[in-house]
Image: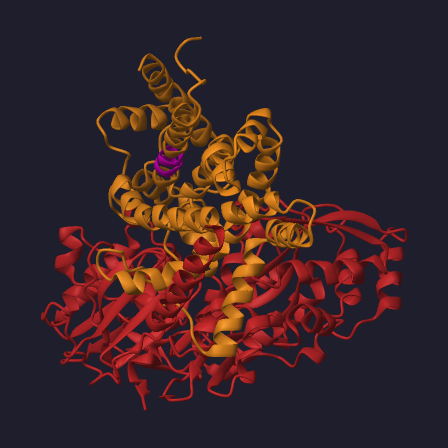
């Protein structure tokens, strides 16, 4: 409990740091909301026109005043107004987040459901032909860029079979579950493929490690069945590196999968942040990066807590 | 156990895949046109937006006083008829009595006056204001008549008024300050929903003065990857799409069910030199660069030959045959000689900037130019930038050379006064002052006789290519792809999609 409180106490500090870095970074890049809206036509503006637009976009003050205003708003639970959407930033983020969360969850499920059994299978068939087969597929999975896979899937489906998931507008799970799964399955497979490959490789090596431990040999000599040894004795200990890996990957996915969202035209968090940067929608960039950082910290915390559950020897709060 | 899981997993995935496929063909109700583009509109204020997609969306919702047809001739929109006074200082319009805003109110002269006053107000931040500075006052003798009093004869102003940036909006909405948040136009479609970077839903405006539309509505999806747009068209998810990338566009005719529409546009690809930086300050160096560039090769390599070599004037009615312009046939010997005469026989080094993906051919153009100029000893360093970073550097004139895709206009004065007159807003970008160009521009502005005007701009074109502040390369096509059962779309050089109002689904 003590540990949890201490971890939570560091959150605001980290978020403050993140917000300052993002705030400065996006403002140090040349170009602003005005050039993003008008492009080269911005050169036709007279100085008073430019001032009027700067005031409209809220970029007419020095950066530290802008930051201070933004920070004050933050304490009142107000992340600002997005200049692209003309709506509160938090609302826009929360609208995009379910898709990203669902995509991340689906990818993780695919990765774990495929990767773990494959890893365990390879470990228990160590150095046999089937082990080699699994390792080769895993290597291919890890080394194929996801945009290549996405384009291949789209091309094969549309040119070969004349089908494609509905693109453009996203149907939330609660409104149209069938269409929703139809839209997300292929992107999740695309993301899950590389993810599953990593899970396979890490669970294979962790399993191999554990299987050579003394306690496993003891269990075997006591006459525990091969299946019992693997699932009851070896697996829980082999899970720790898998949990670490999955936690980190999942955290990344919660930040949005920009390329996959772009190709499958899914309006998720990743594409939203990219568009926000390109359109210099400062409030939206700041708000969403903060949101992503927060999610990442939460996932990290959950991973640490999962260690305790998996291995009773680990005590987080004592030192 | 493992095998058991494997089997369940397999059947689960098969089921899911079947679901995916079952969910796939989202067939339109017959009268809704499903459209896609890769870049979404960036806002809804017709007076402020200049992004290509924003203009394409807004011209389906709002109307200007007049409009351009496929031959760039002025045709009626909100105005039925118009007339310049004999001295060219008064321009009057009669409004179409049937023109109505989507809130039911008639479009009156008061709305026209309020709209132009909004554009001219510096607080609005309308970039198109620069085209209307000759308006001294606006009279509204009756609800259907508007008279613009001009401070000097201004022939191009009528063409500028055909742009959706000069759209007529309701005076009541201006007073309410709601332009840009609500869309009340008088055009063929009403905007029902806009989810930025995702989707637009347009429904037919039954009261449109132009008559009934061919479809009940248009749904526009934003599919950022153009390969995915093509895939979606193959599966008939999308009926009509806007394409930017010539690489994707050339794949369309290979699909039996699809049709590619292409039309040469007014925008031009250009290598901008910065004549305020050494050694581009030297006329002979600039001319040498012009002679060393093989424009056709740039077009063939960077854009698969999809386009046409062009001089500065891209308006078909006014353009000169490029073969008659200075050094449009590559001449390396002449280029080397000019370099030597300028004192740069050994060449020099310079940096060329370009925007990543804007246009998609930018990097390839820079590379071809790099290799061509290497032959006369010019060592080019290519610097590709994110669009906004590029625009920032471009507006400051902070470059040695720049590859650019600059927008065209239906009138040469509106298109070029910004760069080549002494008071042009983008004179800083062109960095080149020339009395001849300035006076030709002023003459072209006030000349009302079409033949005399054509001669003036031919002189302009000849002179500017000889002075070579910029090296004009080629114009490309605007591409739209459609299913073959879509009829009635008419592509136009401005890129306008206005003819979607009359498109039908067979």
| Residue at horizontal 15 percent and vertical 57 percent from the top | B173
| Residue at horizontal 50 percent and vertical 64 percent from the top | B407
Residue B492 location, x and y as percent?
44, 80
Residue A201 vs residue B323, the one in the foreground: A201
Q: Main secondary structure of the magenta part?
A: helix
Residue B490 location, x and y as percent?
40, 84
Does residue B279 appear to the left or right of B207 in the view shown?
Answer: right
Q: Is residue B418 above or below residue B258?
A: above
* A287 is within the stretch colored magenta: yes
Residue A289 vs residue B306, the one in the foreground: A289
Residue B260 vs residue B399, the one in the foreground: B260
Residue B78 location, x and y as percent?
23, 76
Chain shown in red:
B
Hue used for the chain lettered A: orange
Q: Quadrant of residue B461?
A: bottom right
Q: Specify the segment rendered in magenta.
A: A286-292
Residue B427 seen in this snapshot: yes
Does residue A259 appear to the left or right of B36 in the view shown?
Answer: right
The colour scheme used to paint the residues is: by chain
């Amino acid at each position: 409990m003590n540990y949890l409180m201490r971890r939570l106490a560091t959150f605001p500090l980290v978020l403050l740091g993140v917000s300052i870095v993002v705030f400065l970074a996006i403002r140090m890049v040349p170009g602003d909301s005005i050039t993003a809206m008008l492009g080269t036509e911005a050169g036709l503006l007279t100085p008073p026109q430019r001032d009027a637009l700067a005031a409209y976009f809220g970029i007419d003050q020095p950066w530290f005043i802008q930051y201070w205003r933004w920070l004050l708003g933050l304490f009142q639970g107000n992340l600002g107004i997005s200049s692209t959407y003309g709506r509160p930033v938090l609302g826009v983020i929360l609208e995009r987040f379910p898709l990203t969360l669902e995509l991340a969850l689906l990818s993780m499920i695919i990765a774990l459901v495929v990767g773990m059994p494959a890893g365990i299978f390879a470990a228990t068939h160590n150095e046999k032909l089937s082990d080699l087969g699994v390792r080769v597929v895993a290597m291919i999975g890890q080394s194929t860029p996801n945009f290549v896979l996405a384009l291949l899937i789209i091309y094969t489906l549309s040119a070969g079979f004349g089908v494609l998931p509905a693109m453009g507008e996203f149907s939330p799970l609660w409104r149209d579950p069938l269409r929703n799964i139809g839209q997300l399955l292929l992107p999740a497979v695309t993301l899950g493929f590389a993810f599953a490959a990593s899970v396979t490789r890490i669970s294979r090596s962790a399993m191999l490690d554990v299987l050579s431990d003394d306690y496993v040999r003891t269990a075997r000599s006591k006459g525990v069945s091969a299946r019992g040894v693997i699932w009851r004795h070896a697996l829980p200990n082999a899970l720790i590196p898998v949990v670490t890996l999955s936690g980190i990957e999942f955290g990344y996915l919660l930040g949005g999968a920009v390329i996959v969202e772009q190709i499958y035209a899914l309006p998720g968090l990743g594409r939203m942040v990219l568009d926000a940067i390109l359109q210099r929608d400062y409030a939206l960039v700041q708000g969403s990066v903060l949101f992503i950082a927060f999610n990442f910290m939460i996932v990290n915390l959950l991973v640490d807590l999962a260690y305790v559950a998996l291995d009773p020897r680990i005590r987080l709060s004592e030192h | 156990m493992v095998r058991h899981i494997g089997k369940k997993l397999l059947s689960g995935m098969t089921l899911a895949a079947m679901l995916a496929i079952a969910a796939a063909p989202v067939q339109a109700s017959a009268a809704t046109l499903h459209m896609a583009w890769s870049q979404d509109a960036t806002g809804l204020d017709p007076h402020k937006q200049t992004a290509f997609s924003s203009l394409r969306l807004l011209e389906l919702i709002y109307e200007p006083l007049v409009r351009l047809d496929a031959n760039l001739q002025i045709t009626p929109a909100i105005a039925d008829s118009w007339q310049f006074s004999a001295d060219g200082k008064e321009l009057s319009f009669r409004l179409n009595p049937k023109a109505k805003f989507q809130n039911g109110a008639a479009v009156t002269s008061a709305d026209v006056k309020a709209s132009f006053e909004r554009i001219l107000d510096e607080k609005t931040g309308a970039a198109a204001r620069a085209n209307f500075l000759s308006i001294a006052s606006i009279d509204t003798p009756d609800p259907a008549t508007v008279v613009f009093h001009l401070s000097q004869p201004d022939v191009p102003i009528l063409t500028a008024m055909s742009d959706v940036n000069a759209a007529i909006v309701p005076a009541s909405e201006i007073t309410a300050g709601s332009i840009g948040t609500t869309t009340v136009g008088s055009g063929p479609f009403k905007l029902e929903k806009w989810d930025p970077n995702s989707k637009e839903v347009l429904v037919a405006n039954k009261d449109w003065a132009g008559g009934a539309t061919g479809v009940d509505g248009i749904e526009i999806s934003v599919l950022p990857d153009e390969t995915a747009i093509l895939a979606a068209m193959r599966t008939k998810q999308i009926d009509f799409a806007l394409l930017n990338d010539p690489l994707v566009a050339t794949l369309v005719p290979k699909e039996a069910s699809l049709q590619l529409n292409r039309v040469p546009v007014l925008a031009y690809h250009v290598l901008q030199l910065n004549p305020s930086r050494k050694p581009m300050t030297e006329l002979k160096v600039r001319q040498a660069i012009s002679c060393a560039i093989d424009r056709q090769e740039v077009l063939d390599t960077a854009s698969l030959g999809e386009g046409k070599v062009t001089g500065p004037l891209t308006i078909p009615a006014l353009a000169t045959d490029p073969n008659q312009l200075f050094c449009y046939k590559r001449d390396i010997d002449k280029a080397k000689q000019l370099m030597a005469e300028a004192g740069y026989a050994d060449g020099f080094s310079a940096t060329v900037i370009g925007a990543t993906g804007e246009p998609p051919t930018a990097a390839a153009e820079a590379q071809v130019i790099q290799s061509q100029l290497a032959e006369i000893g010019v060592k080019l360093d290519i610097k590709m930038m994110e669009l906004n970073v590029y625009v920032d550097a471009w507006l400051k004139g902070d470059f040695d050379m720049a590859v650019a895709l600059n927008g065209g206009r239906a009138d040469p004065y509106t298109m070029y006064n910004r760069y080549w007159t002494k008071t042009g807003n983008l004179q800083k970008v062109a960095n080149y002052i020339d009395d001849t160009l300035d006076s030709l521009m002023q003459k072209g502005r006030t000349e009302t006789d079409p033949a005399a005007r054509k001669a003036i701009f031919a002189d302009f074109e000849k002179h500017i290519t000889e002075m070579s502040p910029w090296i004009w390369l080629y114009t490309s096509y605007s591409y739209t792809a459609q299913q073959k059962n879509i009829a009635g779309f008419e592509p136009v050089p401005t890129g306008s999609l206005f003819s979607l109002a009359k498109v039908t689904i067979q």
